[in-house]
């Protein structure tokens, strides 16, 4: 057995060991074909089957309704910040963005290049420690869409509800929370997610889009960014990220073996509850986020004394707990506890934190 540490990286994040072992076992000779899966033509029947199975499993896991298309794209969630306004809004049309942190503001800034993107509500007033309640949102009448970031990976702020936007399509950047629990896809017009947290390796971006939104693109939309083009070509208008799709497919199979998203939700809820409970009862660690807006996946925390950050990280690493440094824009620590992080790993983190706090007193 190879040595595996507990990797709390926010992304690219830990993948299930069982998935990596399967990929390793069939790397040189995929399904008796004598080639690796990444040496297959994307136009081959065999690779098409990989895509079809991955899509089917994703559809089953999330209960994706038939009138939604699943696209396997490239360019990360960041390219979707441009693709969304280009595909869904006409130039000059208003689009409403809910500002809950760094990622929603990045989406907004890019949206402004292609339509009249505006902030309809902001977490600014709370110092980005809570999602602004829907009663305070100032939505436009004729917005092309409402954009939300249900989980802010850096700030650790998360929606605990799905907003109601009537006829205006709700668009959500689910990069850091997709597949962590069941989701009512029918409430959204479009969902997008970079793969490198809960789906698979980086290089793949999943878009789930309602069919009636495929034909609203601006004339200038680059062909490759057009959802219609990608939907009509089975996400293969050009060469897709074949290895990443294959690995994502293995993750979807693994999730089904774990009992699907209800089972994952139970585990994820317990993991987060344990870590927050420990932080809250400690007078050495602190998490500033309002309880109802706390992320299940990304848990930032500070130490009572910032001077101890370096020592904390070094000792954590010596204990096999990696990548706990907070994002450079906010400092402090952050534990990302996506699906591949077990309850035991969270227990080991808490054990280390407790021991560290005791030692430095
Ligand atoms: C919520 C969120 N949106 C967007 C991004 C950017 O994703 P990518 O690097 O795939 O473009 C990230 C990356 O961490 C993220 O966490």
Image: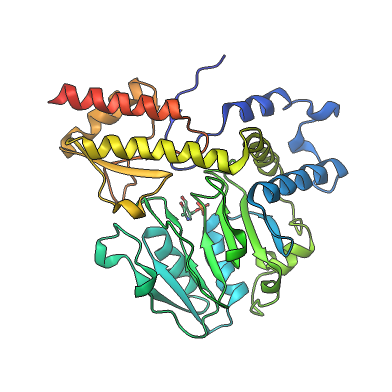
Where 105 falls versus 157 (above or below)?
A: below
Residue 324 visible from this viewpoint = no
Residue at image point 50% right, 17% down: 3
Question: Residue 97's spot in the image, x, y percent?
Answer: 44, 71
- 99 vs 160, nearest the viewer: 160
Quick check: 195 above or below 147?
Answer: above
The N terminus lies in quadrant: top right
Locate the C terminus by quadrant: top left
Outermost residue on the top side: it is: 1
Quadrant hosting residue 213: bottom right
Foreground pick, 159 / 240: 159
- Where does the image place residue 258, in percent across and percent down from the top left? 61, 33
Image height check: is 25 above or below 119? above
Q: Residue at x 46, y 75 (%)?
A: 96
Lateral position of residue 184 relative to residue 11, left or right:
right
Whether 145 is drawn above or below 3: the answer is below
Quarter location, residue 201: top right
Q: Nearer the viewer, residue 292 or 15?
A: 292
Q: Position of residue 54 (x, y in %)?
A: 72, 44
Residue found at the very far left of the displayed protein: 361
Residue at left 62%, top 26%? 18
């Amino acid at each position: 057995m190879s040595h595996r540490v507990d990797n709390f990286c926010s992304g690219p994040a830990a993948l299930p060991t069982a998935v990596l072992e399967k990929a390793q076992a069939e790397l040189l000779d995929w399904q008796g074909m004598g080639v690796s899966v990444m040496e297959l033509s994307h136009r081959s029947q065999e690779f098409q089957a990989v895509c079809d199975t991955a899509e089917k499993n994703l559809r089953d896991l999330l209960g994706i309704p038939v009138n939604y298309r699943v696209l396997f794209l490239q360019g990360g969630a960041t390219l979707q910040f441009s693709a969304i306004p280009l595909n869904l809004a006409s130039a000059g049309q208003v689009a409403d963005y809910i500002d809950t942190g760094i990622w929603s503001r990045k989406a907004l800034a890019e949206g402004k290049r292609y339509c009249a993107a505006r902030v309809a509500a902001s977490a600014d007033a709370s110092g980005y420690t809570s999602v602004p309640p829907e009663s305070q949102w100032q939505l436009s009448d004729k917005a092309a869409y409402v954009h939300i970031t249900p989980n802010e990976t850096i700030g650790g702020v998360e929606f605990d509800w799905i907003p109601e936007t009537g006829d205006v399509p709700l668009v959500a950047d689910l990069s850091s929370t997709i597949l962590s629990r069941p989701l009512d896809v029918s409430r959204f017009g479009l969902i997008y997610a970079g793969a490198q947290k809960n789906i698979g390796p980086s290089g793949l971006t999943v878009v789930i889009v309602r069919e009636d939104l495929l034909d609203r693109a601006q004339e200038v939309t680059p062909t490759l960014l057009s959802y219609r083009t990608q939907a009509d070509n089975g996400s293969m208008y050009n060469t897709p990220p074949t290895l990443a799709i294959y690995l994502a497919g293995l993750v979807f199979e693994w999730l089904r073996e774990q009992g699907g998203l209800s089972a994952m939700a139970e585990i994820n809820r317990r993991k987060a509850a344990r870590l927050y409970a420990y932080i809250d009862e400690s007078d050495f660690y602190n998490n500033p986020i309002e309880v109802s807006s706390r992320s299940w996946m990304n848990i930032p925390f500070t130490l009572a004394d910032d001077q101890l950050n370096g020592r904390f990280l070094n000792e954590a690493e010596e204990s096999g707990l990696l990548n706990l440094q907070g994002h450079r824009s906010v400092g402090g620590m952050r534990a990302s506890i996506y699906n591949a992080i077990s309850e035991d790993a969270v227990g080991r983190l808490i054990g280390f934190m407790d021991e560290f706090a005791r030692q430095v007193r």
